[in-house]
Amino acid sequence: MPNSLSVHYLPQFVAETDLAGATVVVIDLLRASTTICQALASGARDVTAFLEVGDVVRAVEGLDRAELVLAGERHCTRIEGFDLGNSPAEFTPDEVFDRRVFFTTTNGTRALQHARLAAKVVVGAAVNLSAVVDAIAADEAVHLLCAGTNGHVTREDQLAAGAIGSELLTRGPRELNDQARQVLGEWQELLTTARALGRKPSEQFTLELHDTAGAKNLLAIGMEADLARCAAIDALDVVPVYNPTDGRLTPL
């Protein structure tokens, strides 16, 4: 049976059991995927994903607060009482090095939990594009799971899936589902436009992000700079791996 590549625009579009035993790349480009990558690249011991704010508060009880960073967002803004929000720019070594990050976001952490039956779950973004592809290239069944925004399909996740899928196909042919073909076509259009206008792919990606639903939410709160950060292809060499037993993400 040939290797396969499937793309899912939202977690609710694929049953958890359909992901069982496979490799799943969770994509929440704006911004959870990018931020998790940045936190680990900046030396955080691990990032633990929580669904709800209350889950984080309960998990902190009895732990040494000096070793923890509470981070996350609701409606794109930092949660009251937390140390950091969900901008990758916040996750510097000064803030997170050798500390654990307890993390909850609106969309990304839910997508991670949806993949809990998979054999391997990694976090994918533009910033770790090549590193992720290196980590999954030998795997037979690969699913790219887009987180979306508040239950709605988002083009930013689709473009990121197209970028990852395009690079993965350079390592060998795969059977594709319809959604995989769609995102691959959209990514190739982006690359064609970039070449025609003399732009780097990351530059074109940043420009196209401006018209996406997730980006409009960030623009509304003055976080435009995060678009370029999240479109910076291969800026980091880290692959976050998700352990569904304890919710921790650690570098591969």
Image (cartoon, rainbow, N blue to C red):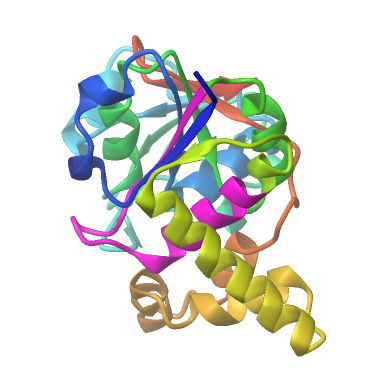
Is residue 156 covered in magenta? yes
Viewer-side residue, 231 vs 159:
159
Is 59 on the left or on the right of 163, as rendered? left
- What count of labels does the image hold? 0
Viewer-side residue, 85 vs 105:
105
Is residue 152 covered in magenta? yes
Which residue is pictured at 74% across the width and 44% down the height? 236
Residue 203 percent coordinates (x, y)? 70, 76
Quadrant containing the C terminus in the rendered view: top right
Residue 84, can we see it? no
Is 127 on the left or on the right of 241, as rendered? right
Which residue is pictured at 76% across the width and 90% down the height? 197
Residue farthest to the right, as pictured: 198
Residue 225 percent coordinates (x, y)? 59, 74
- The region drawn magenta spans 141-166
Q: Looking at the image, is 215 positioned above or below residue 88?
A: below
Which quarter of the figure has residue 222? bottom left
Which residue is pictured at 35% across the width and 32% down the height? 112
Which residue is pictured at 29% across the width and 48% down the height? 107
Residue 136 percent coordinates (x, y)? 62, 27
Residue farthest to the bottom, as pictured: 197
Viewer-side residue, 18 vs 87:
18
Residue 140, can we see it? yes
Residue 111 percent coordinates (x, y)? 31, 38
